[in-house]
Amino acid sequence: MISFDRLWVTMEKKGVSTYWLREKCGIDSKTVRRLKANENMETKTLNKLCVALECELGDIAEYIPE
């Protein structure tokens, strides 16, 4: 499974809130909810997060074998 736990750590380190993601980056609240639930995410959304947070994909997601 893909886990987005690293996203929340990266956001905390950078002082970024979910409000900032929604208002400044165009990430809607439904997408934030899906990230929190580790649900499927489009690559364009992952790209948008990496650009907004100035980070690598590995800073926001990781693969965890089931």
Image: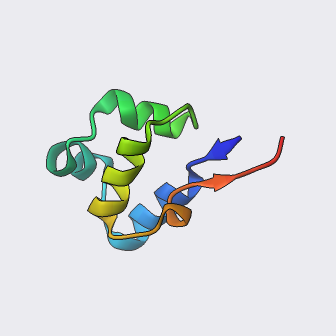
Can you tell which quarter of the image residue 26 is in? top left
Q: Position of residue 55 (x, y in %)?
A: 40, 69
Give the residue displayed 41% in from the left and 49% down from the top.
Answer: 46
| Image coordinates for residue 43, horizontal then vertical, percent | 43, 43
x, y percentage for residue 58?
56, 64
What kind of colouring is applied to the model shown?
rainbow
Closer-to-camera residue (17/45): 45
Q: Residue furthest right?
A: 66
In this rendering, the count of numbered labels is 0
- Residue most toward the top? 30
Of the 4 image quadrants, the one containing the C terminus is top right
4 sits left or right of 49 in the view? right
Q: Residue, x 54% and y 32% (percent of image)? A: 40
Q: Residue furthest front?
A: 43
Q: Is residue 50 above or below residue 20?
A: below
Residues 60 and 19: in front is: 60
Q: Position of residue 15 (x, y in %)?
A: 32, 68
Please indicate whether residue 55 sits to the left or right of residue 52 in the image. right
Q: Residue at x 71, y 40 (%)?
A: 1
